[in-house]
Amino acid sequence: VAVCRLSSNRQTPASMANHKQPATSRWDEKKEHLSAKTRNGFEQWVKRKDTFERGCRLLDALDVSRWDDPAKFRDVIVALAAVDQSLRTEAGPGESEEEVTHGGDRPRQTCAPPPLDGVRGTRRSVFEVFRRRATRDVTFTDVTLTAANERSLSDALTQQLVRDEAGRLVMPTLRYAWPAQQHSGTVAPAVGHLTADQRAQNAIFLRYCRTMWREAQREARTRLGRALADAGAVDRNRAAAAGLRALGIGQLAAWVETDSEIQRVAARDAMREREEKARVTHARFVKRKDRTRLRVPVTEAAQPAPPIPRLDLSRGENGPTRPRVERVSSTALDLARGQGLVWVHALGRGAPGRDGDLERSRRQLLARGHVLRANFDATRDATDEDFDADRFEEIHEKYTAARRRAARARRIDARREFERWNAARRGRARALDCLRALQPPAHMAAEAGAAAALRYWRRIGGLLKAVDGGLLGDWVEWSQLGGNDSAAGVTRASDVFEWAQPLKAPASPANATAVWCALAPRGCDVSRHPSCGGVSALRASLVKVLGSSCDLASAFERLRKRLAASGGEVPPTVTARDLRRCCHEGGLALSREEARQLIDCVDAYSGYGTAPFDEISALLATPVRPGGVRRALRRLTHFEATCPETGMPNAFRVTASPARVRAGPCEVDVTLANGEVRRRWKNPERTARIELLCRIGMVSKSLAHHDIETLCPLPHDLRCALPHDLASELPDSCSISAAALSGASEPRSDLAAYSAWFSASDVPPASSQAEAFGVWGAPRRAALDALLAVSDNARKEARLRLALARGTPPAAPDLWAAGPDELRAEGAPSDALLSRLVLRWRPGVNNGDGDETTVVGPVSFFSLEFSGALGSRAQRENAFSEIARDPPTARDDSFSFQHVVSGLTPDTTYVFRLRAFNGVGPGPYVWRRFSTPPARPIAPVPVRVGARAVVLRWTVPDMVARRAVELRRSFDEVSAGSLHASRVEWLRVVAAHYAPLLSFLQGVTTTRGAATHLSGSGSAGHSGPARQSLLDILESSDHDIIDWAWLCDCLGTATCRDGEETTQFLADALTCAGGHATAGAAADAAVARHVQRLASPTTYVLERCLSELHGEWEEVLRTRFGEATINGLDAGAAHQFRVRAVNAAGAASPSGRATVINTLLNSPPPPRLARAHVRATTNRHPRASAPPYGDVVGVGGFERRFAVSSTTVKLVWLGATDKLTGGHGLNGRGGGPSDRILAEWTGAAGEDEGAVSLTAVLARYSHGREDATFDGKVLPDVLTRLGAHRTHDAEDTALRAAWDELRDAARDVVRTAHFAAWWNADVVTHILQRDQGVPAGRSAGGPSLGTVTTYRGSGRGTEVHGLEPNTRYKFTLRLVSPRSHSRLSPPLEVWTAPAPPSSPIIVRDETKAIVLNWRAGPGGATKYVLESRLVNSRDDGTAAQAPTPTVRHLAAPVRAHVRHRTNATAASYDWKVSYEGHETTVRVCGLQPRSTYRFRVRALNDAGHGGPPSALTQASTASEPQMLVPRRAAEQFSVRAAGDIVVGDTILFTERLLVDRGGNGALLGEPARGAARPLASNANRGNCRSRNATGPQHVGDRTVAAHVVAEAHYTKKGVRELRLEIVWCTVSSHDAAPYVLRPGDVTQRDAAHVIQFQAFRQPWVDEHKRLP
């Protein structure tokens, strides 16, 4: 309307010309013009509306990340300003246009609609849209405030802000605050209004939005002008409109399209991630489902339905009924039973402490005996076997053991956590009690001044923080108290304490938190108390990984394989990207920041940017049980956001790969070794915190000296250095080591990298001390002790005031037993302490409930009660009896505070209780257990003694203890408690009631001297049997009365079948065995002893003597067992050991009797065979130049090299050198003889004789005389005290040899000087022993017949006689010195040489062969060697071409012979081996005709050693061949053969030929091997048998001439079988012609069959030597 009015008032020439037109037409024109103008304005409005709504839609479609990035947010505001400018410049054709200058000045407007710029526009302006969106979503950072803005804020808020370099306040974050809205559907009271600071900040926010909008408008104009200048358009209005659309709507549309694409990509990635997560979830489901899969056994799957119950006819009128069968299914296996299913899935798995369906189904299978591999071991395939006993036991034990281990681990963890919690609870309660009792700082300031109060305040705070980090509020509340426990006038948290105002130190409740955080122990990012900042981001990341149930072990194993395959660093390292991928594979999603925090935590300031694989795998891949995350985090320490100096949380902020290139004023960039950049932002509040602590007196090293003097108004004695040290707050008596304060682990840090992180150059930050301050660690205990010491007087005064105010019963007294050292200092004898306890007590200070404020009353008297030994019936029934009162009556006005309990048993724990009385009543009991010192242990008994080690035992075995008790009881039954008993009656009682004791006495042997008391025989000499059975001595004794002391002495020197130590234990046990006790008392005592061993085990301390003269002993070991092995001893040296016992209470027994043990000498090497002296042989042929026969290889060389014959052996051995004695000499005093002589000459040895003093031993018998003597009875006792009784009692002749060597023949005594010289002499006796020998062919596994001593002396060799030929002997060597002996050396096996066989016997001679026979010598031989030598040849007198003789074994005839010739003439006369084998009859072939040879035989044993050769036999070959033919049978076979046919004979016999008529011509009558009656032979001379019912047919006779080549005897069948080599054979008829034997065939006949008819043989050449 205004536009129309303006246009109507304007007069133009055209309008003046048309003024005369009619009024109607003018009005129509005006109307038309107005409507056109209205239409144009509406279209323009619609266009602007569309632009505005499109801009709003595009703004809503933008990604929210553009509002968070400062650069993108600035571009968005510029685009919105361009949209707003375009709305104001879009006008119709009749409207005025805007002019836009290039410089961005504000355009001039004419006749335009109201602008929508937020100032004069409506709420739907673009600025209003921007402002609403900013107030909802935008947070401005680092906003600089003007002076007006600063005045609008409160002082409390401005003090928390920092100023820039220009002095203006900078607000770190600025966000619009909305009043809290009331939730719908609630009846909560009305929401309050905003605070003044919030309203001021909202105003600042809106002004800052308008400022940014104006800057955006100017930037939009600048960009538009720059665009128009570049375009150079003529129509600037259209160009400006297009430019604004491009800067506004166009830019927003482009951004939306870009963001949409990014969102589509992100949505696609999210979809893929969800799909992958779904696949992982499905795989987990399948895996979890497979874990619940069960293989149903065949018998269970095919189990038939139960039979239908039979009808019940007992119902009477109701008729027959069928019982109902109900089957209740409790598991999935019950549901699948009988359904034919092979696999079934359980309904679920169990939880810890509760079994599920899977476990119950498995137990059902195990209970039925079905152990299928698929149900218990996934790596093995299932089988159809329904039962496997071995697998059942294995799986059963596997699951039960795993369950027990898991339950045990849970119990242990729960117990530890409970102990941790309980210790912290008790410590917190005690600390609060101390704090309530302590005077507040105001009282200290009134007494000692403000400086002492400040020091006192800081010290108490440090001690409280060390005890419990949650005592901050109590500490602040205590600090505000006045001198009379009233408020100190502190009204606000920022007000300084009244007692600190004179010092001008800002010690206020608000600043107490800063001081508390700086006190030790300071928390880190992993371990930090909630009062010091709460949970950090690093701890949250660690809890996220460790608390998840993901299986990261397999994922880390795959990562390890990838790293190994990539060939990277060794050892491999893990980056943040690798960690994210690994956790993603394990089913856990980590952000980049979380992965970076974990890597930096493990990297621990090293500056590498990577973590070692082993360390991060041990931290994250180790399974953590539920509830174990806190325990796992206690081992970690890392400072990233927390200041290690002041303990301030969020003092730093670390980011990886920052977006900005340059670091800000409070930022530091650290470049790691892998190229990554870490930007650390330092909170300005940390500087303020350091300055605040400096004003309070806690000075940081980072401050300069000038700043310290400026900031801190306190004197130097009130200042302490940061970081705070707990040791500075503790007194000297409560000091703790630096190791305990520094914690269990230190981060491995690089100082350069650490300096970059924390701007320091000294050392990396120490541990958070989580380990040291863990389960009531040493620092925490020390801090609590210091608190208790500081508040001791105050607590006592408080208790006294309360006790005087009202009457209460006395507290539980303190009861203890005086220690042995304390009693010995008071003059008590040591032995008396074993059976008594000195109990002492004092009044208690509280009732024992930990609350020290409990009021306790004075004490009138004490009552001591006694229950008995631990485990006794009285103790088990809790029966107590009063044994003492202190004082005894009311008339006694003094307390003794002690009572002596006598008549106790050593090493026994007793139960006592004590309480105090006063006029109000009795106080509570105090229960205590006290143990008497252990009894003196018995002397250690050597069980096994070696050269370098000794096995000692000092506790009596149970079997020996039972024998001792039986022996004492049987003796008491006869003696009625006296020390003498009737021998006959005692033996009768033992035989009737104590059979094990009787068998034991039969096996005990004692020496003749010990038995003299009863037998009445024997002397001091050493003739007759050395030992006799103790039972035989008792039965053959003439004395009717036996003495208990003598019986104990006999058992002390006796030897048992089980070993010498058995009787020694028995002798010691007899001293402890009591009289006969009832069965009930014995059972009660046994139960008590068992409980005693479980409740208070005894520790034994084994000591070794260093110097007997000076009494120096050293502890060797401590053990709870009664046996120990001592290693590393010197060989052949004397050692003295003793034992003392220490019970659980620390009470030690007197040292037991010492035992002297001489370690053995080193075992000598086995003896060696002596070398034989070879003498030249002269009985050789004059023309022979070859070596003698004895050097022929393989024959006769052993006995010529070594001195071994058939009956003698010569042995040699090494001497007793330091190698055998361990380098300590044979006298055991250390060093060899030369070293000892040199030490004595120089005086370096002194008078110390070491562990055993010979002077002290001989002084017992010298009685102060220089030339003292002792008789033979004393010699065993002297050797026992020196530890050599085992050496000289090793055999019967050992003690006799020592006596013969030492005694003075004239006086039959031993002089002590002579004994000392013999004892210290370096003399070694060599004892050579052998066994009984094992003949050849006999097994060596039979029982041993004992050993034979073949030599005793100091030589180094001997010749042993009296041996059997061809026998294996074992020789051993032992070293014996005056002090000790050695073990037997390893055996030397020696085979004696076989005895020489008989000379060869000539059986027959041929032209080129000779048959020889010989007989074995005594002892036999394994094989024989036949040797031959050519003597002469009667053809030409030489043997130039003499062939080498060969042997044709008669038992295995040789059809082809190889002749070896030689060109050497002299070699023909050497001895040559003709035969080597086991046979005694051989045929030597390859000889020369008409030549003379000499033969000899040598026997060899199993070792291949030969004996001496036999006598020579000379034989000549025949000049003419002598053929054995049938026509000369009567001439050649002239000797009648009976039963004396031997191998080597040539026999002639006749046998009948019988043929089976019904067979195939089978021959009957030839015997088979080992047969007693004839069998059959077929026509082909095979051995088969055929029977004919018609009987045999006689076809003729067969005459056979054959050589007997072997024989065999069958003892069980009584058959002697001959093996024959056919010479010729004839038959008596043509029917027998098929059965002729061919010459050379070998057959066998029974000897009885051969001589069945007449048999003849050919005489031997040496017929007279044929039979032995």
Image: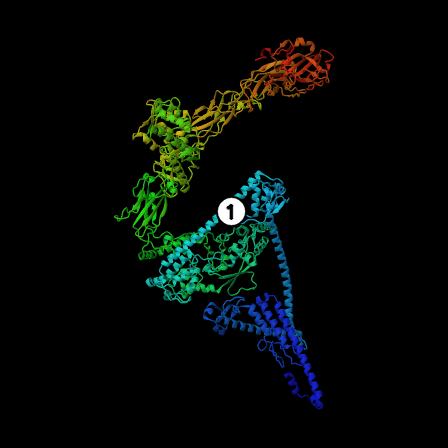
Quarter of the figure with the N terminus: bottom right
Q: Nearer the viewer, residue 1540 or 676?
A: 1540
Horizontal side, residue 1250 vs residue 1532: left or right: left
Residue matched to label 1: 406
Around disc 1, counting alpha carbons within 10 Å, would you say few (fewer than 14), some (14 to 19), or many (20 or more)? few
- 224 is higher (above) or lower (below) than 1060: below
Q: Position of residue 733 (x, y in %)?
A: 36, 52
Task: Using the image, determine if residue 1459 lies above or below residue 908.
Answer: above
Residue at the limit of the structure toward the front, as seen here: 317
x, y percent for residue 105: 60, 77
Is the residue 1572 above or below the residue 261 in the image? above
Residue 240 is left or right of residue 479, and the answer is: right
- Residue type at numbered disc 1: Ala
Q: Give the camera-side residue of 1100 and 1354.
A: 1100
**Residue 88 % position (x, y):** 62, 77
Colour mapping used in the image: rainbow
Residue 1588 visible in image: yes
Where does residue 369 sit, x and y in percent of width and height? 57, 40
* Position above or below: 743 against 1063: below
